[in-house]
Every structure is written in C-alpha cells, then in structure tokens.
Amino acid sequence: MGMNDMIQFFRTMSGKLGSNIYAGVQGQTNMQNISFIRQLQKEMKENNCLDTPLQELQVVVFDLETTGFYPEKGDRVISVGAIKMIGNQLSKTETFYSLVHSPQTISDEISTLTNITNEELSSAPMASEVLLEFFKFIKNHPLVAHHAKHEQSFMQKLTWDLLKTRFEHRIIDTSFLIRISNPLIKSIPLEAACEQCGIEVINRHHALEDAKLTAKIWSHYLTLAQSKGYKNLREVYEYLAKIK
C-alpha cells in the first residue's frame, strides 16, 4: 500500500467514527503501518540517548494545543508543532506543524486562546494522517516538552485509539534540566521559564511557536549543564536522584 493509499484508507476509516473521537482503525488491520511503528519502537530501544554526549544529543521538541486537559474525558488535540535540535542548536529548517481535524466544534474560549477557528479545523487533516506524518518526522529521537505529562497523556491516547499500539517514545520534561539551576523547582509556567532564560514570549499558544520557546529553554539549560561539567543525561539523572 502506497502512502497516498494509506492516507486515503485512514480518511475513509475516520469517516466511520463512533463515540470514540480518535477511533478509526478498526476491523481491517493496516500491517504496513503497524510494521512501521514497530520498527520505530525497535530503533528507540537501540537509541541510548542517556549516554550520548550533550553536544551531540538529538531531540525533537514538541507542543500540542488541545481542547482541555483530559483526553480520557473527550478532550482532543487540535494542533501539533515540533522542532528538531542537535545539542543546544535549533534547526530552523526542520520543523513540523499541522492542525488536526475536529469532528466537533471547539469553544469560543479555546478558539480565542489558540487563534484557531472551527472553519480551519473542519478542513484540517485527519488525526490519523497527522499522527503518521508526526511519527515520520520524529523518527526514533527522544522528545522534549514543557509540562510533558500533558503531551504524553494525549499522545498515548491518540496512538492507542488510532494504531492500537503503545506510545513508547521517551519524553523528557524541561523541568528535568531546569532543576540543575534550582533543585527545588518541580514545574513552572512556560512564560516564567522564558523570563528566567531571557527569552521573549511571542505567539503564545501556537503549537509550533510554543515548541520553539520550549526548545530555547532546553538549549539554555543544556548549555548550563555543560558548563557545570555534565557530559550526558545520565550524569544529570544521577545528580538529581541524589538530591530528591
């Protein structure tokens, strides 16, 4: 099955949604798609990012805009943004952004917050199509997010509902590195983290722009970690484990 056929298959299946917002791959199994995901999972197990020198560490920093905080209660992803990094350097040419088709209208509050309209979502790519393209973009690289549990819960729900497989990419929260500067910090708002790093906040609540802000935060604290003598993420983990 070619990529165009695969996308058409998912579009057809997405039109047969039941009560589950992300349900779409039921009945016939897409073996090519499952094989692709399994290969990614195998590569992730072989990708030992914990021992990679920090200046060589490749990550994908990403952000999701959603209709709420609880995927199990029906909240859904409406946009995805991501940017690739090597060490503390952002790759301005390697970015990902997509709106996600919404089968239901979003509230005026969410539309105002994200500057995304119901008209845009009605013509956006189906969630299945966006998910596949996102996996192709991130490959086997570890992910970075701010308040990562939010992104993780939605990716787990999305991947299981659409592909019937577990979402197994490693997601590292920015607070992991932020704690190098202050071990007592558990979690702070994105704006506060940007302020601490001297990063100008623009286009807030746009998935790609928030991913770029998060990437700049990651870059700032990765540079700090290197200045303190840490060679890889494992050394940072071991240090933070001692002070819990």
Image (tube, rainbow, N blue to C red):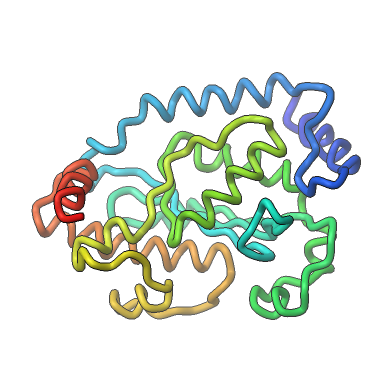
Task: Say whether residue 41 is visible.
Answer: yes
Height in image: 31 above or below 132?
above
Height in image: 116 above or below 130?
below
Residue at point 61%, 56% (across, down): 80
Residue at point 65%, 78% (across, down): 113
Q: Is residue 34 left or right of residue 16?
A: left
Residue 76, image x, y percentages:
70, 56
Of residues 17 and 11, the one drawn nearer to the viewer in this rendering? 17
Of residues 158 and 71, the one drawn nearer to the viewer in this rendering? 71
Q: Quadrant of the C terminus?
A: bottom left
Task: Count the marks.
Answer: 0
Residue 161, image x, y percentages:
71, 39
Residue at point 54%, 77% (across, down): 203
Quarter location, residue 164: top right
Q: Quadrant of the N terminus?
A: top right
**In the current view of this chain or complex, which residue is farthest to the left?**
229
Quarter location, residue 199: bottom left
Residue 210, image x, y percentages:
50, 67
Residue at point 32%, 64% (across, down): 186
Height in image: 131 above or below 32?
below
Height in image: 118 above or below 93?
below
Task: Say whether residue 99 is visible.
Answer: no
Residue 45, image x, y percentages:
40, 26
Quarter location, residue 107: bottom right
Q: Is residue 225 left or right of residue 81?
A: left
